[in-house]
Image: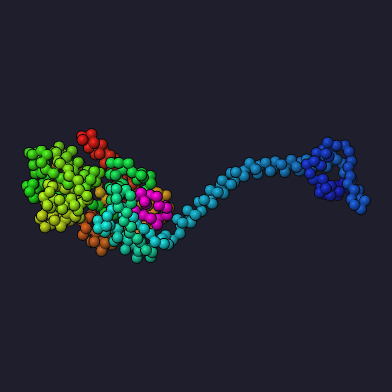
Amino acid sequence: MSAHLAMPLLQKATHTPRAANRLHRQPNKTVYRRDDDGTEHYIQTHQAGTRFKRALNFSHRTLRAIQRHIPVALAIAFTLAASLPVVSQAQETYPTRPVRFVVPFPPGSQLDFVTRLAAQKLMQTWGVPVIVEVRDGASGTIGVNQVVKSAPDGYTLLFTSELPIVIAPVVSKTPYDPRKDLAPIAAVAQNVYVLIAHPSIRAASVKEMIAAAKAQPGTLTVASSGEGSASHLCIELIKQAAGIDLVEIPYRGAGPSVQAVLAGDVSMYCSPIFPALPHIKSGKLRALGVAATTPSAVIPDVLPFPAQGLPDVIISTWEGAFAPSGTPQPVLDKVRDSLKELFADAEVREKVAATGLDLIWMDTPAFTEAIRSDLEKWTRVVQKTRKTQ
């Protein structure tokens, strides 16, 4: 049998590192292998050793190359595997199960009414239950924090006013950062604040109220819904802009504050329009000015503060929807588009307007910018207030 025909048999018999090294150390000898039947196979060791060594060296180099790339390959594989569930969730037909809107203020508020109205319409549009859950307390921060800690999958959303987003984080430390932990979706309504007064103060305008306050410093009293509330900051803006002294008396929310003015227990209150509107229309309370750049649609005869010489007295309020940061963009887009269609409906607009809210629309970029601007504004106001105390 020729040497080249015997080669496969020899390779099969001696293809081990020890055999290859032994053949390589004896390059000039002829080796053979004897089968059980007595057949002998001859081959020159320098040929066998060289071939085996090349084959083994190639195998070792290949193995080392594979070993070097295993960590990278595994990292890529794990990254791709981890991203697959997110992609699939974002691309599914959202929503496929009940959606929950958290409202961080008590039942019966304008915010609660608007959220429940939206939930009814979204239930019809999406074909799944849309639940409104009230989680009030701590200026709305409890409810916001609950949403922040929820899974970013679009099934727990937030409907809130500006207080726990742009005021509470400025007044005190909150367990969340609204700029990092929440994804703004859209703002749908604006809550207009109006300075209401008891008829006993004999003032029908902001100018007359300022004159009365300067004539008798420290005698006019004003209700406040608590430090950091929009009503509190509204009064601070008035005091700073007009240079007057008003004595603040705290109450637990808008309802008790309005009742205090009605009873004559306090002189004034910077109130959301909703709880004050019936008393303004009945003549029991006077509306001195609106803390906005333009008149309110529900009390168009009441001039804004800027038109009465106080250009800085503007309370930028809004009511809007948020999701936890990290929610897939297709889900955010679906919620935004559904809200835009919903609040364009004539019936919905009529019902919202009846609460004293002004309907607006701020999509995500405009809403994000409004939040940034409001945070900067209220930071300046609060810092100035604390310096003068």
Residue 294 visible in image: no
Quadrant in the picture for residue 344: bottom left
Q: In the displayed image of the protein, which residue is found farthest to the right?
A: 38
Which one is nearer the viewer's eye here, 65 or 265? 265
Q: Position of residue 44 (x, y in %)?
A: 87, 41
The residue sitting at 29% across, 50% down in the picture is: 137
Q: For this view, does 202 lie left or right of residue 184?
A: left
**In this figure, which colouring scheme has been used for the structure?**
rainbow
First to last magenta residue range: 144-160
Q: For this view, does 383 lie left or right of residue 126?
A: left
Quarter the C terminus occupies: top left
Residue 152: within the magenta?
yes
The residue sitting at 74% across, 40% down in the picture is: 57
Which one is nearer the viewer's eye here, 81 or 43? 81
Identify whether 247 is placed above or below 151: above
Residue 236 visible in image: yes
Which one is nearer the viewer's eye here, 219 or 281? 219
Q: Position of residue 388 (x, y in %)?
A: 20, 34
The residue sitting at 19% across, 53% down in the picture is: 255
Q: Position of residue 320 (x, y in %)?
A: 30, 52
The residue sitting at 15% across, 51% down in the picture is: 260
Residue 244: within the magenta?
no
Q: Position of residue 324 (x, y in %)?
A: 39, 50
Q: How many discs appear?
A: 0
Q: In the displayed image of the protein, which residue is found farthest to the top?
A: 387
Q: For this view, does 204 lie left or right of residue 254?
A: left
